[in-house]
Amino acid sequence: MAKKVAEVFIETLVNAGVKRVYGVVGDSLNGLTEVIRKSTEIEWLHVRHEEVAAFAAGAEAHMTGELAVCAGSCGPGNLHLINGLYDCQRNRVPVLAIAAQIPSSEIGSNYFQETHPEQLFKDCSHYCEVIAQPSQMPRILGIAMRTALSKRGVAVVVLPGDVGLRECPEPALSLGSFDCAPVMIPSPSELFKAANILNQAVKVAVLGGAGCCGAHPELLMVANLLKAPVVHALRGKEFIEYDNPFDVGMTGLLGYSSGYHAMMNCDALLMLGTDFPYQQFYPKNAKIIQVDRLGEQIGRRTPVNLGLIGNVKDTLDALIPLLEAKTDQSFLDKCLGHYSEARQSLDDLAIADPGRTPIHPQYVATALDELAAEDAVFTCDVGTPTVWAARYLSMNGKRRLLGSFNHGSMANALPQAIGVQASHPNRQVITLSGDGGLAMLLGDLLTLRQLNLPVKLVVFNNHALGFVELEMKAAGLLDYGTELVNPNFATLAESAGIHGARVERPEDLKPALSSAFKHEGPALVEVLVHRQELSMPPTISLDQAWGFSLYMIRAVLNGRGNEVIDLANTNLLR
């Protein structure tokens, strides 16, 4: 008997190495889920919200570099995927999204739950097409998977439920040996131009991003030859800062003053695999060389003197023989000294005074760093949890750090942890969750228990959208609409069958974390942290300084002077 479209569809996924599909079931997906139910080679991971499915698939793809899959039923079901898919697309991870559609005969009639996914998903995917006939399916699915892998992003296949139940005249396809990491090197003439700029420069700095993955030895060799301090963007942290004697920290709003000053005082900047977005943090008078495998990214953040299209590792391999070793390392030494001071000032903030509450969030992050496994995977919510992760979690070449660093979506940490833990059952997975982020997709706390995923959630509870409050204060505004009336998250977790602990005193933090990490199943540790903790950027503009002054004036005039006192006590009287 001829196989149904759904059978050939799933067989194609299995041939491509797909092990799981994240989603929420629905009648338009029945054909596919029935095939998965009978299969021993692929499983359905039932989450509580489709947005979580997309985030989870993206986290799996981020960790493995291989294709991950999520699915949503027709109309509202697949619409819920969109936010997570935007994150996958902007993180450049290969994800296939299955968007089920209403019965094909009803399309165009304003039928129940009718939408047009082929239009809706265009902006967050490299490929989005409808399977209208059974004979189309293997080829369209193959194109979608190859597109996701080769372009490192999202591909969407729209499948009407009735088409999935028809007989398929074509067999399942195989992707074959599909190499997604081709060698990419600039031309010899371009490399000579780059070497000439770098050899003539006196003070060279390097800014690296996620494109430095797999290029650690080459990066250190270049830094050593050029006596160049190495600054990293947030997505480059896990690939750059470990075992790096040239590291001077991160730049940007979440970074260190040392990273900022290294870039601002160089006369040549070598950008490696980064699309760091903030124009105000780039030097104005330095010659800039940018290396990126995506030519469209070159020069879009700051003007560059030379753009090189290529992979970082391949390009550095070809560039190194052309570089002249510098002997003067006074600029490097100055930057390293500045970094040591900046690092010490940050470490001084991570203190714990027994009995003093609330707890400084920096101390929570340092405790996590100390107690977590050598190969732990961290996921962090946007806002202040990302600040503390960036500044206090140390990478070692084995640990990983995931977040919504480009898309900047709330509520990403728990969903990403689900994808990491499902695909890496033997790794320790820890979230740095904000109280606002966790609450936004709180229902998928139940997914941890249902799938028995031993994720460890650490919740920074400051009863506010803390980073938003800081942004308001920097703009000279009173915070408004940011307060959160939270439940006892630990009690809530326990009601769902999850190990829960609530920490109010600093001396209780490490025992609670240790107990949670030893627990075999999922665990949640809620920590009451300072609401008024400042996360200062490496440089403050006059506008920002005026904003904070204006905030304080307005707070006092509005009878909220106690907030100013609390802010001072939290950040000055330690």
Image (spheres, rainbow, N blue to C red):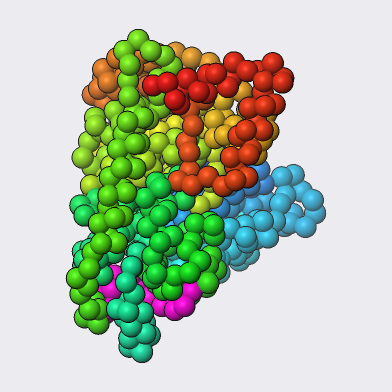
Image-quadrant location for residue 399: top left
On-image quarter of the C terminus: top left
Q: Is residue 172 visible?
A: no
Q: Toward the viewer: 362 or 38?
A: 362
Q: Is residue 289 visible?
A: yes
| Image side of residue 120 versus residue 308, left or right | right
Residue 412 coordinates in the image, percent (x, y):
49, 40
Residue 239 coordinates in the image, percent (x, y):
30, 55
Residue 532 coordinates in the image, percent (x, y):
52, 25
Q: Please, which residue is most extreme toward the right here?
A: 109
Image-quadrant location for residue 270: bottom left
Question: Does the magenta segment cover residue 119?
Answer: no
| Image side of residue 17 versus residue 302, left or right | left
Compared with 496, 19 (above or below) is below
Q: Residue at x 39, y 70 (%)?
A: 268
Q: Residue at x 33, y 86 (%)?
A: 192
On-image quarter of the N terminus: bottom left
Question: Does the magenta segment cover residue 309?
Answer: yes
Q: Residue at x 56, y 25 (%)?
A: 464
| Image side of residue 273 versus residue 376, left or right | right
Residue 326 coordinates in the image, percent (x, y):
22, 72
For the record, the magenta segment spans 304-319
Q: Toward the viewer: 207 or 21?
A: 207
Q: Toward the viewer: 207 or 51?
A: 207
Q: Please, which residue is most extreme toward the top here?
A: 355
Q: Toward the viewer: 109 or 264?
A: 264
Image-quadrant location for residue 546: top right
